[in-house]
Image (cartoon, rainbow, N blue to C red):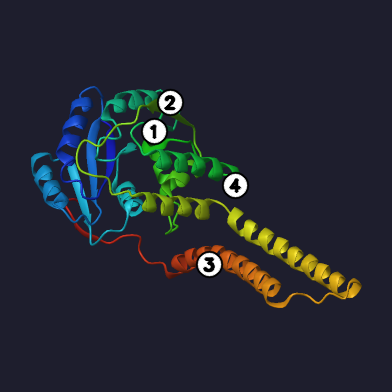
Amino acid sequence: MQELSLVVPCFNEEKTLSFFIKEVEKVSEKMEVEIVYYLVNDGSTDQTLSVLRELAQVNPRIRYLSFSRHFGKEAALLAGLKAAKGEFVTVMDADLQDPPDLLPEMFRLICEGTYDVIGTRRSGRKGEPPIRSWFAEVFYKLINNISETKMVDGARDFRLMKRQVVDAILELKEINRFSKGLFNWVGFKITYLSYENYKRVAGETSWSFWSLFKYSLEGIINFSEAPLNIATFIGIISCLISFFTMIYYFTINLIWDNPVPGWTSTACIILFIGGLQLFCLGIIGKYLGKIFLETKRRPVYLIKEKNFD
């Protein structure tokens, strides 16, 4: 029987894991495939690791690995994809916001052979704070306008992939990873299943508005050079404004013999140009920081414990 590897990043999910395994086991009976779990403990501070050990003792198809500290969801996804050995691989969250009920339909579609990836997307953002939903919509519109790699609004990491797709993703060796973009960058034929937004089955999300904002910036920087072009454009505009401002004050002084008022105009120009320079340097600094991290070649994660070879 073919294996479907289920990759699940876990960070402080002690309250959800038992529910998650139970729900997946229910739907697995509808699929002619063996589901093997690859649960990645991303340095949780609660009892997630203890729960994983207990679950693995009961179910031999549960394989877990635990990081030495919290490295982030991107690292957990990468570790899970590297560990997964199945002909098919699914990425899911443990909080049941990715409904296991969709797995049989996703598996049926991918077995038809037409598609290499069956993705999922939320048809709405019911239950989310309005400001968070608005920023999410703005992000997708922005990234799709400035990047050649298009991303689907509402798309989740929850997807079923053929082994060829997973191998292609693992060929991407970059340290600064943005999986939503990498999944689309590798190409292959993909279709999406839509579903209504689900609430967490238990516990609280570790994603705050600020962490999501920083994550969106990672996506923009990793998949677009537009910010660098904007910095160049701003530099040109500021130079032109400064040039015409000098012409204006020179003309006033030459024709009307009206000396330039000193401190106000000078201070405004200096502050304006200085602010633009700092803004542009900040953009350039973000890209340089990414290059710096890549050149150090540090491992994306470190494994402290696992229950399989």
Amino acid type at circle 4 is Ile
Mark 4 and mark 3: span between their CA atoms? 19 Å
Label whose residue precedes the other's in the sequence (3 or 2): 2
Amino acid type at circle 3 is Gly
Label whose residue precedes the other's in the sequence (1 or 2): 2
Position in image of residue 263 (x %, y %): 68, 77
| Image vertical order of residue 76 relative to residue 105, above or below | below
Quadrant where the N terminus sits is top left
Mark 3 and mark 2: span between their CA atoms? 45 Å
Mark 4 and mark 1: span between their CA atoms? 24 Å
Q: Secondary structure at mark 2?
A: loop
Nearest to viewer (mark 2 / mark 4): 4
Mark 1 and mark 3: span between their CA atoms? 34 Å
Mark 1 and mark 2: span between their CA atoms? 31 Å
Q: Secondary structure at mark 3?
A: helix
The residue drawn where x is 41% and y is 67% is 297
Do we see residue 309 in this rendering? no
Mark 2 highlights which residue?
113
Classify residue 288 as left or right of residue 42: right
Nearest to viewer (mark 1 / mark 2): 1
Label whose residue precedes the other's in the sequence (2 or 4): 2
Amino acid type at circle 2 is Gly
Nearest to viewer (mark 3 / mark 2): 3
Q: Residues within 10 Å of mark 3 (few under 14, many from 20)?
A: few
The residue drawn where x is 35% and y is 63% is 299
Mark 1 highlights which residue?
125
Callout 2–callout 4 Cβ contact below 8 Å:
no
